[in-house]
Amino acid sequence: MLLVACGIPAPADRKESAEALAAGSMTATYLQTQRFDLYSLSRTNDPQDLLVVYIEGDGLAWLRIDKASPDPTPVTPTALKLALTDDAPAVAYLARPCQFADEAHRRNCRNVYWTSHRYGEDVVAATNEALDLLKRRTGAQRLGLVGFSGGGTVAALTAARRSDVVWLKTVAAPLDINAFTRHHGVAPLTQSLNPADIAETLASLPQLHLAGADDRIVPAATGDAYMTRLLDSRCASLRILPGTGHHDGWEKRWPDLAQETPICR
């Protein structure tokens, strides 16, 4: 009722809208990890060696700066919209903990997991488990990870723990969470993990980080903060796209960007 009063669609309506976008092209399931049931959509034409997995952003984490949302299901599922424009043979979409969760799949759903602990150990471990489940479901051996916004943060943290990720792309992602919180003048995310702190672990992984020149939520400068920690890696690049905001502009550009495979120079 509070969400409706604020003009925000109810969680069930947000889920219905997302499933309408994916209708006829992707199949939905919940992936049962040790701590959470993660919502996922996927399509595979045939068994494929490479599975491209899109990880959603933070979603509706806050109703206002001092009030956490009761449900983090995104109003605008940007990662899903990008996944739907990707014509790779095998594509999966992975929501963050408690996004799109019905009553039967809300285990351990406390708002710390989309606020202070949003990039914490429990979240990263669950994402890691979910990727294993997606590989088994699709028969894939290798992964390409694409993360939007905070999903890019989680993608980077998860990639650092795996040997089967062959490339990483992030879109409008806060890759140095300390630079991100300083920019917004809010308390540090002390219960979360920071990709910048493990950047050297990722230095040999082909990766492309995309930032919007007009993004006021995750300014391109936060990507610079991460890149400086990579010690001039030949495998990582940061590209700033003009006329692109945090959500705006990516869907139109993505059919071309999805074709790019990050490589080491």
Image (cartoon, helix red, strand yellow):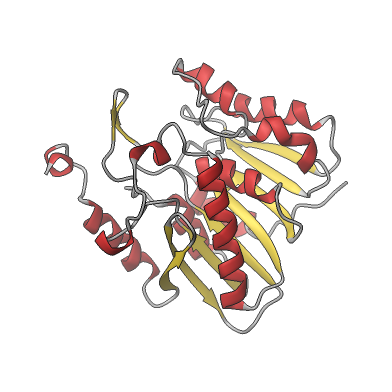
48 versus 261 height, above or below: below
Q: How many numbered marks does the figure carry?
A: 0
- Whole-percent x, y for residue 162 in the image: 72, 55
Most foreground residue, 151 or 198: 198
In the picture as drawn, the residue positioned furthest to the bottom comes out as 46
Q: Is residue 148 visible?
A: no
In the picture as drawn, the residue positioned furthest to the front comes out as 34
145 versus 203 height, above or below: below
What residue is shown at x 56% (from left), y 64% (from top)? 86
What residue is shown at x 85% (from left), y 31% (from top)? 232
Most foreground residue, 197 or 168: 197
**Residue 6 falls in which quadrant of the image?**
top left
Most foreground residue, 102 or 46: 102
- Whole-percent x, y for residue 77 in the image: 40, 52
- Whole-percent x, y for residue 93 in the image: 50, 62
Q: Quadrant of the N terminus?
A: top left
